[in-house]
Amino acid sequence: MIRQIALLLSILSIVNCTSAFAQEDQALKNWFNDPFFQVRNALPACPVPLGPLITEAQRNEEAHYRVERGTSCWMAGKCEKPNSYLYDAPIAEAVRQRFSASPEFADASLWITVQRRFVIVQGCITHAEQAARIESMIAVVPDVERVILQLISTPHEKPPYPLASPLPSTNGNPTAP
């Protein structure tokens, strides 16, 4: 009987350790320090994007791919720096400064992620026409290769980006609060 209890406690201990390890592996983190920040904050109901947060397992899957993508720019003669991710911090600072210096889009909620010279804009705008102006404002920043817009302009629209936290349940009714 004592052996059975000891065996059971050992099994429970192993299960508990495995569970803790699995939870740690699921912890979200910005493993690659990709710039991610909010530039506009007018619409409090706007769903917050997940940004560059990923699990450790996702990081491990992505690491080789990022090295390959990052150096291909330099190898193709399109970048002076040996890795296109080295442009991200200066691009992020320039984008942040452009928004700080401009009163435009004061009625929006916008987040910026910069990865490999791509600027990803996620969030909510009040008029669909704002999207083209946002893209134009960012596209002129030196070293930006591409601007990717993931925006919604109508209330209760499903965002085209992963969320930092799930949207509240609407019980199948997309207009429910």
Image (cartoon, grey):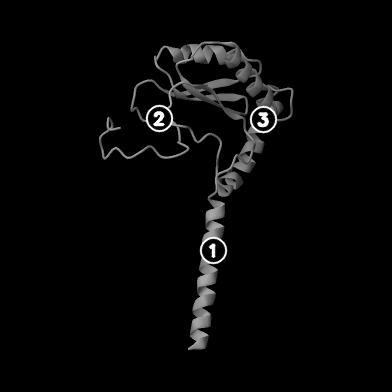
> Quick one: 15 or 5, which is closer to the camera?
5
For disc 2, the marked residue is: 159
Q: Quadrant of residue 139?
A: top right
Name the residue beneath numbered marker 1: 18
**Residue 85 badge:** 3
Instruction: State whether residue 98 is above or below residue 5.
Output: above
Callouts 2 and 3 close, C-beta under 8 Å: no
Q: Which amino acid is tagged 3?
A: Tyr
Q: Find the distance from the CA under tag 1 to the CA under tag 2.
A: 35 Å
Say which residue appears at 53% left-offset and 10% top-offset: 103
Q: CA distance from mark 3 to mark 1?
A: 35 Å
Comparing 143 with 138, the one in front is 138
Q: Amino acid at mark 2?
A: Pro
Where is residue 79, by image quadrant? top right
Q: Residue at x 68, y 21 (%)?
A: 78
Asked if residue 101 lies left or right of residue 126, the reply is right
